[in-house]
Amino acid sequence: MIKYIIVDDEPLAHELIEEFCNLLPHLQLQKNCYNALEAMEFLNSNQTDIMFLDLNMPKLKGFEFLRTLRQAPKVIVTTAYKEFALEGYELNVVDYLLKPFSFERLVAAINKAISTKSQGVEIPKAAPKSNRFFLKGDKKYHQINAEDILFIEAYGNYTKLFLKEEMIISHQKISSFEELLSKDNFLRIHKSYIIAIDKIKSIEGNRVFIQEHKIPIGQTYRKEINELLG
C-alpha cells in the first residue's frame, strides 16, 4: 500500500486529489494538512511515501517548508504557478503538476514517485480518460469533459472556458490548457484563443465560426489553419 498526504490550504484542492486517488486501490490517504506547520508536525512522527504539496500557502510557503525537512517523502507539487518549476526540480521534487491537471497526468506523477517497477499504479479500466479534468472557477471546482469545450479565450488575467451549456471563468493561463488538452482535438489559432476542432462550423477569411461565435485567426497561426484545411 502506498501512503500519501496532501498539503494545501484549499479544501477544494484536497477533494480533487482525493477523488482521483480514490480510483487507485494501491493508494491510502494518511493525512489532510492545510498548512505546512501541520504537515511538519505529522512528518516528525510519521512516515509517508508521497506528499502532494501546494506552494502558495500562508505562514510557510511550500518550498520553504520543503527545505526544512531532513528526509522528505517523494514530493509531487500541485500548483497554479509554473514559474517555480525550476526551483522545484533543484529541490528534487518528483513531478510538478500545473493546475488544472488530468487524472492520467496525476497517475504518471505517482508512477514517477514509486521507486520499483512492481509497485507501479495501473489506471483502472473504469477510470476517467484524459479528457476529464477539474477546473477552479467561482470558488469551486468544476468537472470538465473536454468533449464539451467549444473554445477557450484568454481574458486579461483570466481565461474564459466556453462549453456547450455554460461559460466558466478561471485564473488558469491559456498556456496551461494548451499543455493539458490533446493536440489532435484542439488547436491554438490566436494568442488568445484555443478552439475545439470538431466544433468548427465554418472558416471564412480570418475567422473561425463555432455556433454563434466568431473567433479571429492570428497571423502567426495561419499556418496551423492551412494545415488543418489540407
Image (cartoon, helix red, strand yellow):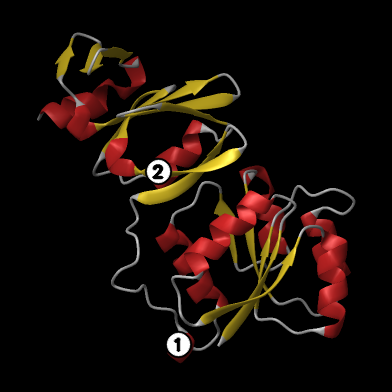
- For mark 2, give the secondary structure: strand
User: Disc 1 or 2, which lies upstream in sequence?
Assistant: 1
Picture residue at 56% right of the left edge, 61% below the top? 17
Q: Nearer the viewer, mark 1 or mark 2?
A: 2
Q: Position of residue 84 (x, y in %)?
A: 69, 48
Q: Quadrant of the N terminus?
A: bottom right
The correct choice, above or below, for 227 with respect to 67 in the image is above
Tell me what residue is drawn at x 16 percent, y 31 percent.
Answer: 228
Pick the front one: 124 or 118: 124
Q: Residues within 10 Å of mark 2 (few under 14, many from 20)?
A: some
- Position of 215 relative to 143 (above/below): above
Closest to the observer, 95 or 86: 95
Question: Which of the 4 image quadrants contains residue 188?
Answer: top left
Q: Which residue was labeled with disc 2?
A: 144
Is 127 on the left-hand or right-hand side of 54?
left
| Label at residue 117 | 1
Asked where in the image residue 224 lies, by quadrant, the reply is top left
Real-space Cα separation, disc 1 to disc 2, in angstroms: 32 Å
**Do callouts 1 and 2 mark residues in contact (Cβ within 8 Å)?**
no
- Say which amino acid is labelled 1: Lys
> Residue drawn 80% across and 80% down?
71
164, 222: nearer the viewer: 164
Please report the residue visible at 62 percent of the width from the left and 44 percent of the height from the top: 80
- Tell me the quadrant of the picture where the C terminus can be found: top left
Compared to residue 76, the image places residue 80 above or below, namely: above
User: Camera-side residue: 175 or 123?
Assistant: 123
The picture places residue 187, in percent across and down from the top left corner, at 30, 33
Label 2 amino acid?
Answer: Ile
Q: Classify mark 1: residues with Cα within 10 Å, few (<14), some (14-19) or many (20+).
A: few
Circle 1: element type: helix
